[in-house]
Amino acid sequence: MTVPRQGNRDRALLLEDVDLADPSFWTLPRSVRLEAFALLRQLDAPARFTTRATSRGGTRSGPGESFYALVKHADVKAASRRPQHFASAPGVTTPEPAGWAKAVFGNSMVNMDGEEHAALRRIISRAFTPRLLAGAEENIGELARRLVDELVAERPDDFMPSAPSRLPLEVICDLMGIPERHRPRISQQIDHASAYVGVRRRGRDRLRVPGRGLRSLARMHLVMAGLARERRRNPTGDLISALVRADVDGQALTSRQLGSFFSLLLVAGVETTRNAIAHGMALLAQHPEQRALLESDFDRYIDGTVDEIVRHSTPIIQFRRTVTDACSLGGRSFRPGEKVVLFYASANRDGSVFTDPDAFDITRNPNPHLGYGGGGPHHCIGAHLARLEMKALFRELVARQGTLGTVGEPQLVDSNFDNRVRSLPFSFNSR
């Protein structure tokens, strides 16, 4: 990878500089990576990239493994909605989950296809009853008020450990019926499980004992197995009770399926929402005219604000698919077994779909972003919940505009999987 870092560039970025399979590409400033995606979108067909042999301590992805990069909005959307050609199995992340891990922890819903995926999704979808969701919405508003009250009282220097992290965790735990005694440990386990997803380890981190993330998942599964047994005997009206006692064509979730779903809900739901909230705070601070517009009529502009934050920040950068049948897409023919990677971060900046795509505009309409997975059978099942959380928290934050001060530049993690925020400097106005 030869692309010079931002601030020290003596020439324009060239197509031959771009290698999405090189880990060093993901250490470049985000603006340079977005520029690289813009170059790739100009090609007539998806480009092919090949990983190098993995060095000791690196992320294992298989020496010489190739993939095609889907970077255009139309291609990413089409692949998302053609599971008969572009399958989620054996896995949507890199590296793909090992067979033994699936046997021990259960297969995640994001890695399933066809009737196996549809059956599990039916059970989960029907458990989200209108009554349950109405209660969740009321709870989200109350939690947002309490967390922002605490934020103002405690006045932390870093925004990340406070409301944006705590709100989605508390919402999910309340919805599932997780007792308070388990929550601090679960929060730690989420951090351990997701710390190195898509991240190239450096220095001392390369020497860490492997398997910490798996041990964290195992602990979460043990908690869920115990709660599942308890709810089968004594249901309480929470989501765990609904899932383990569901009767959808005679099916309910097993303890292992419940653990796998809970892990997905926590790691995906908490991380993506907290990152979207943090990026939203930074974007509104960087664009005071947009913040003023939101403040002028919150109810009118908040839906557009949430959509534009998700589009502009794209919390999940990519997912992969495996070609199952010979097909064509975006000017290229694919053979069974080949890998394609859906780059949502690129699709959401496609100038053929979005006018002035790099601008942050809360009035953008329409806004057909692919931030929740591009539609199709794997459209994010928690999208509605995430939107409710963002709207509730921003409502409270905007209401405290006289107390909240400046927001600094977000410190990002060099990840090829998610647009993760490590820290967000924060200050308060004088009392």
Image (cartoon, rainbow, N blue to C red):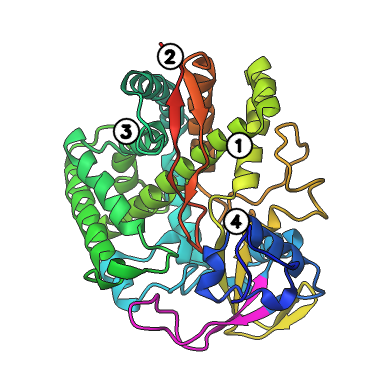
- Residue assigned mark 3: 174
Relative to residue 177, is residue 336 depicted above or below?
below
The answer to whether 141 appears left or right of 9 in the picture is left
Q: Residue at x 31, y 23 (%)?
A: 154
Contact between labelled residues 4 and 2, with CB atoms less than 8 Å apart: no
Of the two numbered discs 2 and 3 in the rendering, the one whose residue sits closer to the viewer: 2
| Tag 3: amino acid | Asp
Q: Position of residue 129 (x, y in %)?
A: 45, 35
* Residue sitting nearer the eye, 376 or 68: 68
Magenta extent: 48-69
Relative to residue 255, is residue 325 depicted above or below?
below
Contact between labelled residues 3 and 2, with CB atoms less than 8 Å apart: no
The answer to whether 408 appears left or right of 140 in the picture is right
Mark 2 vs 4, N-terminal side? 4
Describe the element under mark 1 as helix, strand or loop: helix
Mark 1 vs 4, N-terminal side? 4
Q: CA distance from mark 1 to mark 2?
A: 23 Å
Q: CA distance from mark 1 to mark 4?
A: 14 Å
Q: CA distance from mark 2 to mark 4?
A: 34 Å
| Tag 2: amino acid | Ser
Q: Is residue 251 visible?
A: no
The answer to whether 422 appears left or right of 372 in the picture is left
- Residue assigned mark 1: 283
Q: CA distance from mark 1 to mark 3?
A: 29 Å
- Residue assigned mark 2: 430
- Residue assigned mark 4: 30
Mark 2 vs 3, N-terminal side? 3
Q: CA distance from mark 2 to mark 3?
A: 35 Å
